[in-house]
Amino acid sequence: REVMKTELKLEIEEMKMEIKNLDEKIDSIQKATKKNEEKMKIIEQQLEKNEKKLELIEYKIKTDNKETEEALIHLEMDRASYYLRFQNVEESREEDLTSMMAEILADFLQRDKEEIIREIDDIYRVHTSYARRH
């Protein structure tokens, strides 16, 4: 009987030690879980910041593209309005006015088409530079 009591006490002590070890393990797991949750919150906050930055960059790119497109359209319109209008020459949206005018002028002036194109470009540059200054 005495031996049984001693064995029972020993087993109870062993169980207490095992329970204590399990409690420590559970505690360390809970601490690790809490640390991971905090890290995830930080990562989520950084992700939100990055998404906002990305949205802002996308918006800026879109507005810059629109502005560039509008500026290009205005430049094309300015260039097209600069050219002389020839009678009986049909205009189309994608026409190459420089080439068309150079061809007509080259025939009329009996000069080389490339030379006429260079002169048209020179006149255009001089005119636009003068217009910018005044």
Image: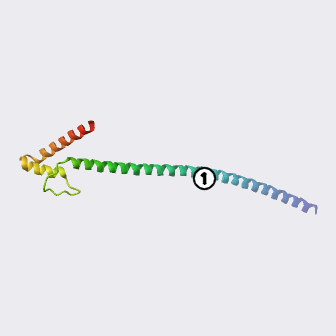
| Closer to the camera in the image, 133 or 54 | 133
Q: Looking at numbered disc 1 in the image, what kind of residue is underneath it?
A: Met
| The quarter of the displayed image where residue 25 is located | bottom right
To which residue does mark 1 refer?
A: 40
SS under mark 1? helix
Crowd band around label 1 with a 10 angstrom C-alpha radius: few (<14), some (14–19), many (20+)? few
In percent of the image, x 17 and y 49: which residue is there?
98
Q: Most extreme residue toward the left, as rendered?
A: 110
Q: Is residue 10 left or right of residue 42?
A: right
Q: Quadrant of the C terminus?
A: top left
- Residue 108 screen position, x and y as percent: 7, 49
**Which colour scheme appears in the figure?**
rainbow
In percent of the image, x 19 and y 56: which residue is there?
91
Q: Is residue 35 left or right of residue 56?
A: right
In percent of the image, x 84 and y 56: which residue is there?
13
| Closer to the camera in the image, 71 or 87 | 87
Q: Is residue 88 left or right of residue 48?
A: left
- Residue 9 screen position, x and y as percent: 88, 58
